[in-house]
Image (cartoon, coloured by chain):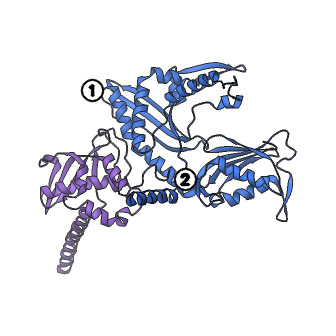
């Protein structure tokens, strides 16, 4: 009887430990996910004024300010590399650069472009720069995940990338 | 002065090194459905059959929503380096041109020659047609816009880009603002489709259509046999071989042929070619088919033929005489 009891206790212990292991892996994965250059969390909120795109973008950082800055950079990066999903009356917007692996090909250019206080800030027209609150401000174990509403000067950004020979002009070759 | 001379030289070299392909003309046309459903149409008797055609002039003169959408699209396309040819202005130009041609005389009293085919060709033309259709719809107290825009290659009739969708319903915003939003929202996606079309064109050549026909005075037909490099081939096969050698990657499709007609579609012609002086020149269907005419004009064919152009992307070769 004692033998059976020990076996059951051991089995329960193993079962209890498995989720812990999974959780640790998930946290690690989550960290990679937050730092991924491809992970932009975006939600369209309407059709922007002439030449602009408006949407809600999430950013993660150690504090709220860092998360906001990350969200701003992600907003511009999403317009360049990923495009915007449609919704709330706006149609899907394709990325400005359609060339595969452009972020690697022009890595030096984008490193300067997205540097702290870099040129990318020129294309964020309006944001909710005050600290986000309520559902737009999530406390994580080590930091914050916040959402801000941005207006990206999409056409101006495209023109700049075309002028720098990073994006292809529609009339190139004609 | 030296600096200016150097600058001019560099600019000249740049132009010489990077010649430009022929730019397609883009024009917005309201769709037949848009015009006819709103009464912008004309009906006439065509040999006993009643035929209804869109009346673009009436549509552009009386529909402010249409004008608003076309203006907004024109503004966006001009920003992308493709100013649209304006349909309304083009129709006015054609009318004016006709009136001036009728009045114009030389000092000796001679008039300008205009054949029936010249008159027939005096219409508004574009290489890429933006076929536009939109509807202001109601859903209870709310208004929304249903928008449909197709980019059609005028020669291959292929849709090269397109967007369609409905905007967000609203009870507070004026329909004009909703229309503007529809254009702003859809045009980036539409231009991305157009960009894919141009990228394909630069990679694989311009896709055009070519027709080979015979004058009824022609002594030969397309089944006439010739000895070409020791091989006896029919004229249509010799034309196939020429296309094999001159199309980009030998890509073309002879979709139909008889003794008196050969129809070639999806013919991929190069955008540029070097002329006799070694200078790169832009190629259109006319220059491409003219090269074929030159080839057939030499031995063993010694054929006289005429090239008839139907825009940037279609030409006919008519065999027998000029």
Element on which disc 2 rests: helix
Element on which disc 1 rests: loop
Residue A36 in sight in this render: no
Q: Residue B164: x and y, percent?
A: 44, 38
**Is B230 displayed left or right of A156 in the figure?**
right
**Image: B94 above or below B157:** above
Give the chain letter at badge 2. B
User: Chain B hue?
Assistant: blue
Instruction: Looking at this view, name the residue that lies furthest to the front.
Output: B1
**Marks 1 and 2 in Cβ contact (< 8 Å):** no
Q: Residues within 10 Å of mark 2 (few under 14, many from 20)?
A: some
User: Front-most of A29 and A101?
Assistant: A101
Residue A22 in sight in this render: yes
**Is B86 displayed left or right of B154 in the figure?**
left
Q: Residue B158: x and y, percent?
A: 57, 44
User: Nearer the viewer's eye, disc 1 or disc 2?
Assistant: 2
Q: Residue B40: x and y, percent?
A: 52, 21
Give the chain letter at badge 1. B
Mark sitting on residue B172 = 1
User: Chain A hue?
Assistant: purple
Q: Residue B31: x and y, percent?
A: 52, 31
Residue tagged by mark 2? B201
User: Front-most of B244 and B38?
Assistant: B244
**Is B193 displayed left or right of B321 in the figure?**
left
Q: Quadrant for the N terminus of chain A, please.
A: bottom left
Q: Which residue is depicted at the point 56% across and 24% down?
A: B96
Q: Quadrant of residue B69?
A: top left
User: Front-most of B283 and B144?
Assistant: B283
């Amino acid at each position: 009887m004692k033998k059976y009891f020990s076996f059951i206790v051991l089995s329960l212990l193993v079962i209890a430990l498995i989720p812990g292991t999974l959780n640790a892996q998930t946290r690690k994965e989550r960290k990679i996910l937050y730092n991924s250059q491809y992970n932009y969390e975006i939600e369209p909120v309407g059709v922007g004024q002439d030449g602009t795109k408006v949407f809600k973008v999430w950013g993660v950082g150690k504090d709220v300010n860092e998360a906001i800055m990350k969200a701003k950079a992600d907003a511009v990066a999403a317009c360049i590399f990923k495009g915007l999903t449609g919704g709330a009356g706006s149609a899907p917007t394709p990325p400005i650069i359609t060339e595969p692996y452009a972020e690697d090909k022009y890595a030096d250019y984008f490193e300067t472009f997205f540097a702290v206080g870099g040129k990318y800030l020129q294309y964020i027209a309006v944001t909710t720069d005050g600290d986000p609150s309520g559902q737009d401000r999530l406390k994580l174990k080590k930091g914050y995940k916040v959402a801000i509403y941005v207006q990206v000067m999409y056409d101006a950004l495209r023109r700049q990338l075309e002028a720098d020979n990073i994006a292809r002009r529609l009339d190139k070759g004609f | 002065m030296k600096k200016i001379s150097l600058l001019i030289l560099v600019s000249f070299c740049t132009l010489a090194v990077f010649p430009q392909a022929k730019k397609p003309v883009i024009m917005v046309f309201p769709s037949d459905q848009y015009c006819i459903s709103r009464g912008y149409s004309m009906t006439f008797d065509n040999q006993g059959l009643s035929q209804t055609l869109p009346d673009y002039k009436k549509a552009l003169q009386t529909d402010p929503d249409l004008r608003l959408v076309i203006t907004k699209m024109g503004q966006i396309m001009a920003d992308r380096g493709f100013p649209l040819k304006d349909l309304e202005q083009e129709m006015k130009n054609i009318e004016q041109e006709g009136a001036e041609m009728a009045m114009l005389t030389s000092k000796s009293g001679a008039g300008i020659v205009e054949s029936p085919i010249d008159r027939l060709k005096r219409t508004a033309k574009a290489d890429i047609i933006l076929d536009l259709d939109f509807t202001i719809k109601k859903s209870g107290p709310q208004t929304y816009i249903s928008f449909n825009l197709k980019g059609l290659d005028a020669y291959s009739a292929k849709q090269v880009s397109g967007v369609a969708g409905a905007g967000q319903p609203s009870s507070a915003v004026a329909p004009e603002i909703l229309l503007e939003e529809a254009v702003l929202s859809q045009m980036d996606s539409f231009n991305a489709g157009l960009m894919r079309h141009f990228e394909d064109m630069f990679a694989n050549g311009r896709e055009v259509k070519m027709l080979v026909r015979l004058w009824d005075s022609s002594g030969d037909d397309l089944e006439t046999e010739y000895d070409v490099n020791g091989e006896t081939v029919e004229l249509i096969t010799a034309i196939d071989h020429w296309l094999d050698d001159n199309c980009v990657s030998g890509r073309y499709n002879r979709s139909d042929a008889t003794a008196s007609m050969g129809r070639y579609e999806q013919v991929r012609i190069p955008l540029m070619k070097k002329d006799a002086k070694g200078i790169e020149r832009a190629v259109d269907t006319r220059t491409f088919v003219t090269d074929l005419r030159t080839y057939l004009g030499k031995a063993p064919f010694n054929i006289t033929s005429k090239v008839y152009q139907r825009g940037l992307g279609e030409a006919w070769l008519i065999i027998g005489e000029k």
